[in-house]
Image: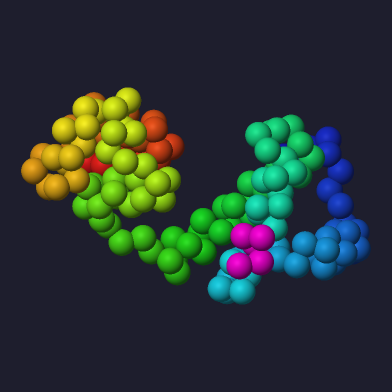
């Protein structure tokens, strides 16, 4: 098997760069609640600095840290399944929205029926709500 054209660094070379990086960042893996809290602060700072620039030199690190956080959260912070109308109510509360603010998704009367448990959320409305709140449509079905 042929070796790639990219030189493979020696472990001592990796260590010389890794230790200062690890000290500067403060978290390189997320295994504890403290790691998670620190990673959240670092991730927010990276998001502020990088924004949507996928070509930013730190974009790979941002994705790596986000993956570390996601894995920790999946194992340690499971999100309980909620009724679709409860999810909608939560998202509305988080954004201080009234039923009349969601007319781009469904008529106010239909939103009221959904929130009162008198009507399920249709697939079409679920897609519009998902787009509106930037979440997956499955949360509403």
Q: Which residues are magenta?
A: 37-41
Residue 11 appears in the picture as rendered: no
Q: Is residue 126 above or below residue 64?
A: above
Image side of residue 54 versus residue 22, left or right: left
At x 21%, y 37%, the residue is 111
Name the one closer to the observer, 96 or 40.
96
Image side of residue 11 versus residue 112, left or right: right
Image coords of residue 75 (percent x, y): 44, 66
Image coords of residue 23 (percent x, y): 82, 68
At x 71%, y 52%, the residue is 45
At x 43%, y 66%, the residue is 77
Q: Is residue 138 above or below residue 122?
A: below
Q: Name which quarter of the figure residue 141 lies in.
A: top left
Residue 70 appears in the picture as rendered: yes
Residue 48 drawn in magenta: no
| Secondary structure, magenta segment, majority class | helix
Image side of residue 86 versus residue 41, left or right: left
Image coords of residue 8 (percent x, y): 84, 48
């Amino acid at each position: 098997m042929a070796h790639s054209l990219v030189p493979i660094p020696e472990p001592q070379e990796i260590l010389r760069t890794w230790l200062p990086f690890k000290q500067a960042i403060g978290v390189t893996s997320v295994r504890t609640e403290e790691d998670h809290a620190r990673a959240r602060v670092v991730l927010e700072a990276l998001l502020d600095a990088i924004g949507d620039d996928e070509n930013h030199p730190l974009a790979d690190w941002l994705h790596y840290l986000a993956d570390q956080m996601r894995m920790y959260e999946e194992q340690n912070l499971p999100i309980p399944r909620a009724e679709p109308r409860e999810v909608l109510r939560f998202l509305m509360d988080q954004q201080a929205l009234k039923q009349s603010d969601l007319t781009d998704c469904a008529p106010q009367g239909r939103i009221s029926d959904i929130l009162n448990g008198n009507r399920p959320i249709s697939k079409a409305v679920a897609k519009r709500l998902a787009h509106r709140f930037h979440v997956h449509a499955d949360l509403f079905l």
